[in-house]
């Protein structure tokens, strides 16, 4: 199962304070929109998202169709196929991609400990 790029999406209380902290660890801004309270930071292949007032918990995020530089992959497993496979295995989905569409879509599951996992395709 190819899940694409991986990052952790952190629910932060103060976007600028979190940005400053992670910059001390060598992360640099890579994308996002501070005016909308979110930033993507990168250190080598490691990617973290900082999201202020957008969700309650940290989320593991996978991006089918992207590499770690947010560049489109030549081949990848579509988010809808990943969703079908998980549903066939009895995994309960918190949200689902519309399987009648193509292109960008997402679904969400939780692991056995309640950690949210977002599979978010942008291509």
Image: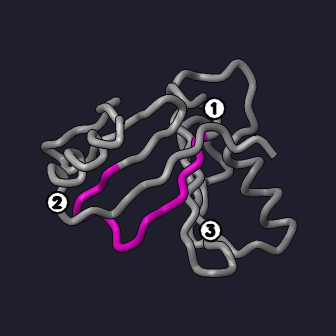
Q: Quadrant of residue 76?
A: top right
Residue labelled with disc 2? 14
| Pick the front one: 98 or 33 | 33
Q: Which residues are magenta?
A: 50-63
Q: Residue at x 60, y 62 (%)?
A: 96
**Which tag, 1 or 3, sits closer to the chain's start?**
1
Q: CA distance from mark 1 to mark 2?
A: 31 Å
In x, y percent, where is residue 94? 58, 72
Query: If you read the primary sequence from the N terminus, does the residue marked by circle 1 or circle 2 appear first?
Result: 2
Residue occupying the far bottom of the picture:
113
In front here: 121 or 26? 26
The residue under the point 42% across, 55% down is 9
Name the residue tied to disc 1.
65
Q: Quadrant of residue 114?
A: bottom right
Distance from disc 1 to disc 3, alpha carbons, whole Å, reads 19 Å
Quick one: label 2 or label 3, which is nearer the N terminus? 2
Q: Is residue 86 left or right of residue 9?
A: right
* Pointer 3 residue: 109
- Marks 2/3: CA–CA distance: 27 Å
Q: Is residue 28 magenta?
A: no
Q: Are marks 1 and 2 in contact (CB under 8 Å)?
A: no
Give percent across and percent down for residue 119: 59, 52
Q: Residues within 10 Å of mark 1 (few under 14, many from 20)?
A: many
Up-down relation of residue 8 to residue 3 (above or below):
below
Q: Position of residue 54 (x, y in %)?
A: 29, 62
Instruction: Describe the element under mark 1 as helix, strand or loop.
Output: loop
- Above or below residue 47? Residue 95 is below
């Amino acid at each position: 199962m190819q899940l694409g790029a991986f990052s952790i999406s952190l629910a932060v209380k103060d976007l600028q304070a979190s940005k400053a902290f992670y910059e001390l660890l060598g992360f640099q801004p890579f994308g996002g929109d501070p005016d909308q309270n979110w930033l993507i930071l990168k250190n080598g292949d490691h990617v973290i998202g900082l999201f202020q007032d957008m969700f309650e918990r940290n989320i593991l995020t996978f991006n089918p169709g992207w590499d770690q530089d947010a560049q489109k992959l030549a081949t990848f497993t579509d988010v809808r196929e990943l969703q079908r496979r998980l549903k066939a295995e009895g995994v309960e989905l918190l949200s689902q991609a519309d399987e009648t569409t193509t292109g960008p879509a997402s679904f969400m599951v939780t692991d056995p400990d309640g950690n949210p996992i977002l599979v978010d395709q942008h291509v």
